Image (cartoon, grey):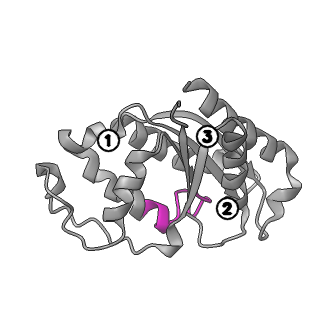
Amino acid sequence: MENRMKVLGIVGSPRRGGNTHLLVENILDGARDAGAETGILFLDGQEILECDGCHACWKGNPCSKDDDMNDLYGMIAENDVLVFGTPVYWYGPTALMKGFIDRFVYFNCPENRVLLADKSAILAVPFEEEDPATADLLVAFFEKSLAYLGIELVGKVLAPGVTKLGEIKYRQDVLDQGYELGRRAVNRSR
């Protein structure tokens, strides 16, 4: 029996049922319809402490922080596609998402770097302002960070002009784009 591709949606918004959550779910729907196994991680439900630069992980040792991130490393490693969902907060990701990404320093050492081999990512970014350039710095942050880690960014969906809780459900063009990204990410990896 062939192993099913695994896709993990990571919601970096504190609003469950909000635009980021709904957009990530839509991407996961596309991946699931393409045959993938999917899961979702809400960062607001995790205790993720800040990285303090102790460099224990750079030496191949376990992270010195005693928090939920230590279990999340295994979850990250077992998924083929990571869907990073975050609204734009002050032209960057939310603090929840930034703290999560900061802890990817764990993957810097050669022993842990292999855990990210052949992974790809999708970026889902809803935001209040109408100008798509509002997300430029956030997108650049992910492009550079993911490239450094060897994770291929296979697509992004931006949703400008959404503010109210769940109003993205009225933006069928954006939802369709997200759904297709989810399908394509699975189909391209076969």
Dot 2 amino acid type: His
Q: State which mark lies toward you, 2 or 1.
A: 1
Q: In x, y percent, where is residue 176?
A: 81, 41
- Residue displayed at 39% across by 43% down: 145
Q: In x, y percent, where is residue 5?
A: 54, 37
Q: Is residue 170 left or right of residue 68?
A: right
Q: Quadrant of residue 21?
A: bottom right
Q: Residues within 10 Å of mark 3 (few under 14, many from 20)?
A: many
Residue 161, magenta (yes or no): no
Give the labeled residue for mark 1: 115
In space, the residues marked 3 and 2 are separated at their CA atoms by 19 Å
In space, the residues marked 2 and 1 are separated at their CA atoms by 26 Å
Asked whether disc 1 touches disc 3, contact meaning CB atoms under 8 Å apart, the reply is no
- Residue displayed at 41% across by 46% down: 78
State the SS at label 1.
helix
Q: State which mark lies toward you, 3 or 2.
A: 3
Asked whether disc 2 touches disc 1, contact meaning CB atoms under 8 Å apart, the reply is no
**Magenta span:** 85-98
- By secondary structure, the bulk of the magenta-drawn segment is best described as loop
State the SS at label 2.
helix
Dot 1 amino acid type: Leu
Question: 84 or 158: which is nearer to us?
Answer: 84
- Residue displayed at 60% across by 49% down: 38
